[in-house]
Image (tube, grey):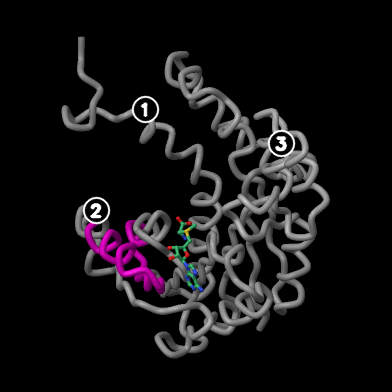
Amino acid sequence: MSDPSPAAGGESPSSRRGPLRTGVVREVIGEALALRARTTGVDVLDVLDTGGGSGNFAVPVARLGHRVTVVDPSPDALFALERRAAEAGVADRVRGVQGDINGLFEVVEREGYDAVLCHGVLEYLEDPADGLHRAVEALRPGGALSLLTAGVGGAVLARALAGHFTEAREALVAPDGRWGSGDPVPRRFTAQQLTDLIDDAGLALVSVHGVRVFADLVPGGLVDREPGALEALLKLEATAAVLPAFQAVAPQLHVLGQKRG
Ligand SMILES: C[S@@+](CC[C@H](N)C(=O)[O-])C[C@H]1O[C@@H](n2cnc3c(N)ncnc32)[C@H](O)[C@@H]1O
């Protein structure tokens, strides 16, 4: 019997399931970058990943051939980013900079980027609208903003399915979408709140996607055992992602905006 372990050169079940967590978002970003490259006539774009952490998204973007600057306050995350970029053979296209979105222009240039990613950061900011404005200021006119945050509905569903009904209700009614004082996430958003933020920041709304609508609810073993199940689930995720009914219960929401001008 063959050994599927990564050490034996095979793919682990959790890495095989990676596209379920990030596939929808990566595809939207890939298309936005391809469009930007076509409209500007520039093949190698400048991309900023604010709060990019260890490079979940920055490294795949660099693999598309673009130059990525990651700004993150965590030295550990930046160290992991450096290692990951080197392993992927894109160290020359990924630059890690220690910094904070609140002091973004102490470390990067205003209007210096074709695309800005802001993934999993807005939840942790005291003033999300202010943080978003800074991200937009880093964009060149016509550039794309990729915003990914925790979704309220997904947390409500997850707490309810785990039998925590009071917490589920609390997440549903609390203005910040938290299920209680033990909730590790400081804030969650609805699709409407995100599209309002995008509008207030002066961006044109391009698309909204629900992320991991089913992936977090389906037992991993089921996906790993059944032949073709992963591919079928990926197709289901992609189809559901654009439907408001499923966005309303998604654990993560992705919004793409474009800077006017
Ligand atoms: C949930 S992780 C997301 C990492 C990555 N963007 C991703 O989607 O995989 C949040 C990241 O935001 C960073 N972060 C937290 N507060 C920040 C701030 N004020 N400005 C910029 N980054 C921040 C953290 O260090 C961490 O790497």
- Indicate which disc, 1 or 2, sits on the residue closer to the N terminus: 1
Pointers 1 and 2 in contact (C-beta within 8 Å): no
- Circle 1 Cα neighbour tier, 10 Å, few/some/many (<14 / 14–19 / ≥20): some
* Residue on which the image places disc 1: 13
94 or 6: which is nearer to us?
6
- Indicate which disc, 3 or 2, sits on the residue closer to the N terminus: 2
Residue segment shown in magenta:
62-83
Task: Count every numbered label the image shows and give the total.
Answer: 3
Pointers 1 and 3 in contact (C-beta within 8 Å): no
Look at the picture and state if 239 lies above or below 146: above
* Residue on which the image places disc 2: 88
- Which secondary structure, mark 3? helix
Q: Nearer the viewer, mark 3 or mark 2?
A: 3
Q: Position of residue 261 (x, y in %)?
A: 66, 83
Q: Position of residue 94 (x, y in %)?
A: 30, 68
Tell me which residue sits at (43%, 33%) in the image.
17
User: What is the CA distance from the residue labelled 3 to the residue labelled 2?
Assistant: 36 Å
Q: Quadrant of the N terminus?
A: top left
- Which secondary structure, mark 1? helix
Of the residues shown, which amino acid type is indicated by label 3?
Leu
In the visual, does 35 lie left or right of 200? left
Of the residues shown, which amino acid type is indicated by label 1?
Pro
* Residue on which the image places disc 3: 157
- Which secondary structure, mark 2? loop
Look at the picture and state if 62 lies above or below 97: above
